[in-house]
């Protein structure tokens, strides 16, 4: 027996990916509803062997739904997630709106699955930021073996993190460089084609950006508030796939071979780490895959107990839609999703 599921934001890149992954993982869905803004009413999205027409969020009756996966932006979530949760279903929200709310669990199933037990308090679960998810999946098995003192991470984040508009801007600018003439930036602050931009989100008073603060705050909430973090987030001209250069300082020794073995055994992690010209993962190779990939595992000689890693994941999958569906699977396994009687 399956669930009645609604995907809110079903026409967006992450919403469509949620539908794909629900099908790929054979999540038990009895009835699927696609929900979006009024401008998308009637737009059809793929579901299994057929199509589902989008319905207006303002008119949809959420009281007859068991589970809602939401990827419609923070403003929509702040307005609608409490209303939806009050109607009965659990909401798994992909936006930043609820991540740092102390009453809302922020979950990466491989890292803090027991937080799922708090799901019924407000019927909202937050899905972390894409770059945070892959970082904490890689850090968790190492932190369990040797407590982490400090992490310095630089990200290389693809344009799909800014949605379909970001992907379109990279495509248009790339064509412009070769054939059509210059294209002014609209989504990003500067040209992204053949360039990198060390700014994601707005700047804060301390000089950090919104994205950098998200990574730091969310890592503290999910993994350990005692870990010191220094984060630099960079947008790069890659369509899909986020990469991170991670330097870790531990409180006690952890040899690189031990770390490699721990990561190989860790859930959700694939280690590709040979010291030759092809023995590492790139975002292109991670595209379409579920895993968090770790390469370039080596000693950091600048601190007493240090390691360096290269961490890559598909930001639309593990960084967003897949993690949301895995949260749904976790809730299902623990019997935390109530079922409505189907009419």
Image (tube, rainbow, N blue to C red):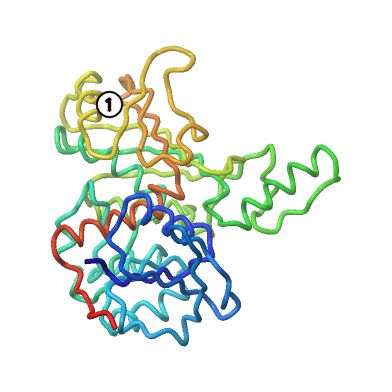
Q: Is residue 62 above or below residue 8?
A: below
Q: Say which residue label 1 marks.
A: 306
* Quarter of the rendering occupied by the N terminus: bottom left
Q: Is residue 319 above or below residue 238?
A: below
Q: Position of residue 275 (x, y in %)?
A: 40, 13
Q: How many marks?
A: 1
Residue 116 seen in the current view: yes
Residue at disc 1, secondary structure: strand
Residue drawn at x 40%, y 64% is 96
Front-most of residues 60 and 74: 60
Residue drawn at x 27%, y 72% is 90
- Direction from residue 54 to residue 108 in the image, left or right: left
Q: Is residue 258 above or below residue 317?
A: above
- Direction from residue 172 to residue 137 in the image, left or right: left
Quadrant for residue 281, please give it: top left
Quadrant for residue 8, please give it: bottom left
Residue drawn at x 32%, y 50% is 25
In the current view of this chain or complex, which residue is farthest to the top? Answer: 276
Residue drawn at x 46%, y 43% is 232
Front-most of residues 319 and 305: 319
Residue 234 seen in the current view: no
* Quarter of the rendering occupied by the C terminus: bottom left
- Direction from residue 214 to residue 186 in the image, left or right: right
Circle 1 packing at 10 Å, graded few (<14), some (14-19), many (20+), is many
Q: Position of residue 121 (x, y in %)?
A: 18, 75
In the current view of this chain or complex, which residue is farthest to the front? Answer: 49
- Direction from residue 83 to residue 285 in the image, left or right: right
Quadrant for residue 23, please give it: bottom left
Q: Position of residue 183 (x, y in %)?
A: 79, 51
């Amino acid at each position: 027996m399956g669930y009645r599921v609604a995907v809110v934001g079903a026409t967006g890149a992450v919403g469509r990916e949620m539908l794909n992954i629900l099908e790929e993982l054979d999540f038990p869905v009895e009835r699927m509803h696609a929900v979006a803004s009024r401008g998308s009413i009637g737009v059809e999205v793929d579901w299994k062997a057929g199509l589902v027409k989008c319905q207006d969020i303002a008119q949809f009756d959420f009281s007859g739904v068991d589970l809602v996966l939401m990827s419609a932006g923070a403003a929509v979530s702040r307005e609608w997630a409490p209303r939806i949760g009050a109607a009965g279903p659990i909401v798994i929200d992909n936006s930043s709106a609820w991540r740092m709310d102390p009453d809302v669990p922020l979950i990466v199933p491989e890292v803090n699955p027991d937080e799922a037990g708090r799901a019924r308090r407000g019927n909202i679960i937050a899905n972390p930021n894409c770059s945070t998810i892959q970082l904490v999946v890689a850090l968790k098995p190492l932190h369990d073996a040797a407590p982490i003192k400090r992490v310095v991470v630089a990200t290389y984040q693809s344009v799909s993190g800014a949605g379909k508009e970001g992907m379109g801007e990279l495509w248009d600018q790339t064509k412009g460089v070769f054939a059509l003439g210059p294209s002014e930036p609209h989504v990003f602050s500067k040209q992204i084609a053949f360039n990198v931009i060390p700014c994601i989100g707005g700047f804060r008073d301390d000089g950090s950006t919104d994205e950098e603060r998200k990574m730091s705050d969310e890592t503290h909430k999910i993994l350990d508030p005692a870990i010191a973090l220094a984060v630099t987030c960079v947008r790069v001209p890659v369509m899909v796939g986020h990469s991170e250069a991670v330097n870790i300082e531990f409180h006690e020794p952890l040899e690189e071979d031990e770390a490699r073995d721990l990561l190989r055994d860790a859930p959700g992690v694939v280690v590709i780490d040979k010291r030759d010209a092809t023995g590492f993962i790139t975002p292109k190779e991670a595209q379409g895959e579920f895993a968090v990939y770790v390469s370039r595992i080596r000693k950091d000689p600048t601190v007493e107990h240090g390691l360096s890693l290269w961490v890559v994941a598909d930001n639309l999958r593990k960084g967003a839609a897949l993690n949301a569906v895995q949260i749904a699977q976790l809730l299902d396994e623990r019997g935390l999703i109530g079922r409505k009687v189907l009419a």
